[in-house]
Each structure stands twice: as structure tokens, then as C-alpha cells.
Amino acid sequence: MIIYECEDYRAMSRRAANIISAQVILKPTSVLGLATGSSPISTYGLLADWVARKDLSFAQVKTINLDEYKGLSPEHDQSYRYFMNKNFFNRIDIDMKNTHVPSGLATDLEAECRSYDALIEGLGGIDLQLLGLGRNGHIGFNEPADTFTLGTHVVDLTESTIEANKRFFASEDDVPRQAITMGVKHIMQAHRIVVIASGLSKADAVAAAFGGCLDPHVPASILQVHPNCILCADKEALSKLPDRSAVITV
Ligand code: F6R
């Protein structure tokens, strides 16, 4: 595990964007696993700027997103498909048919989960997975639980996640209570994982995930045993990490 301590959100975003761009330059046909939320917005912005400058191309890249809210259409401005199109896909040279987000409108959610797993496997797995970190230690929408769930699944969002995400909706009542999320198996099978975390609100989650025991009640803790996981975090997010021996200040 490599932990980069970056000065602030901007520096964290640049570090993550650099790692992703290196991945795409070295393997233009990469399969990228992608996340939504506040954390990756600047990372996507930088990558889009580099595409605009013709320094980078996603023309042959395929993407697979972690999750989607149940019941939100791709046109809903809080759906993760809408987020990805707005913040990334519409700003780069990717072929839209190579971008994948679970369908929140599927009538048979179980079938949607199985076909999403088959899709990931059909793509040959994920070369690089980008992850944000929930304040409760979730990755994707793999919420704290007694066991890790391996495959794509439907999840009941926890009160903590509903509370954290209500800022994006008109009211707390509008936050969907369920979502579809990629499971821990395909995340852990990614060849490389880049986790981004910024701000004091993530400090407890970072400390629990990367400074504590492996525990399904802190889903991100499983990343400690991934052979090629990089945490890009800012000073505030790392401020409660008990053991700084793996920290590289950049
Ligand atoms: C979103 C996702 C979530 C977020 C996490 C952090 O696709 O997978 O796990 O990464 O909730 O969200 P932000 O970045 O908004 O703090």
C-alpha cells in the first residue's frame, strides 16, 4: 500500500489524475472503474483539460462505474449516469457506448446485478479502479455490514450515507434509500486501485480503513490487502492515521 500525503484537494486531484493518465498512456485500451461524488470532480476536470490539449485520449478506453441509485433515470440530475456524463464523459473523447453505469431503473434488479457482473468479466476485469471513501468507510455503496458482499448487489443505504448525500438533493426525503453497487470481488480484482480522500470529514474513515483491522464494518479496510493500492489523500484526511510509516509526502 502506498499512501501519498498531498497538500490539499487540488494536489490530491492532480496526483490521482497523473496516475490515471499514466495508466491510459501505457495501455490505451484500459478498463477504468470509476466513482462519482465530490472527491473525483477535479480529477475528472484535469483529465478533461489534458484531453482538450490533446495530451491524452480516452478513445479506446472502456469504463465501468461503481454504482447507481435505485429509481433514478439517467436524465435525473442526481443520477450517477448524469453525473458522469456532465463531469467527465461529455468532456472527453470517449465512445459513449464504452461507458457503463448500472441501471437504476431496471425492473429486475437481481438480473441487472448478474448482467453487470457478466459485463465486468466480459471486459476482462478492471485495470484501474478509482474509489472515493464514504464517511462510514464505504467503497462504492458497499456499506458497513457483518460480511463483505462479493458480487454486484442491491443495497439499503445507511442513515450515515443518506445524511452525507442529502446535500445533493432538495431534501433528505428525496435521497433514494437503495442503490446498486459493484461488490468487493470486482473491486479487489482490479489490477490497481486508487483511493482519493480529502478533508477532515474523511479523517476518521481513513484512520479506520487504513490504520485498523480488516473489518466488514469498515468496508474500505479490505483494501489493505490489495497488492497494488494507492491512497491519495490530503493532510486533513490523513490527520488521524495512527501509523504514518507508509506515508509519502508529495
Ligand atoms: C460514488 C461512490 C461513493 C463515494 C463516497 C464518497 O460512486 O462510490 O463510495 O465515493 O460516498 O463520496 P464523496 O466523494 O462525495 O465524499
Image: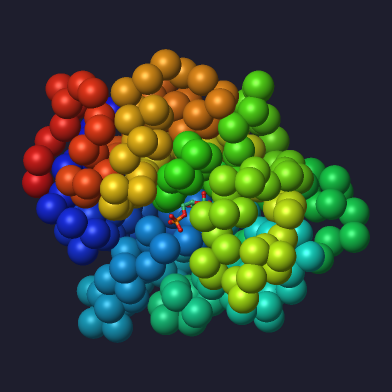
Q: Is residue 235 left or right of residue 44?
A: left
Above or below residue 113? Residue 42 is below
> Which quadrant holds residue 108?
bottom right
Look at 39% across and 28% down and name the residue there: 208
Q: Is residue 181 left or right of residue 2?
A: right
The color scheme shown is rainbow
> Which quadrant holds residue 13?
bottom left
Above or below residue 148? Residue 63 is below
Residue 59 x/y as whole percent: 44, 72
Look at 44% across and 27% down and name the residue there: 221
Q: Quadrant of the N terminus?
A: top left
Look at 67% across and 47% down and name the residue there: 157
Residue 250 x/y as whole percent: 9, 46
Let me know if residue 47 appears in the view: no
Q: Is residue 180 left or right of residue 249?
A: right
Residue 22 x/y as whole percent: 26, 55
Above or below residue 219? Residue 194 is below
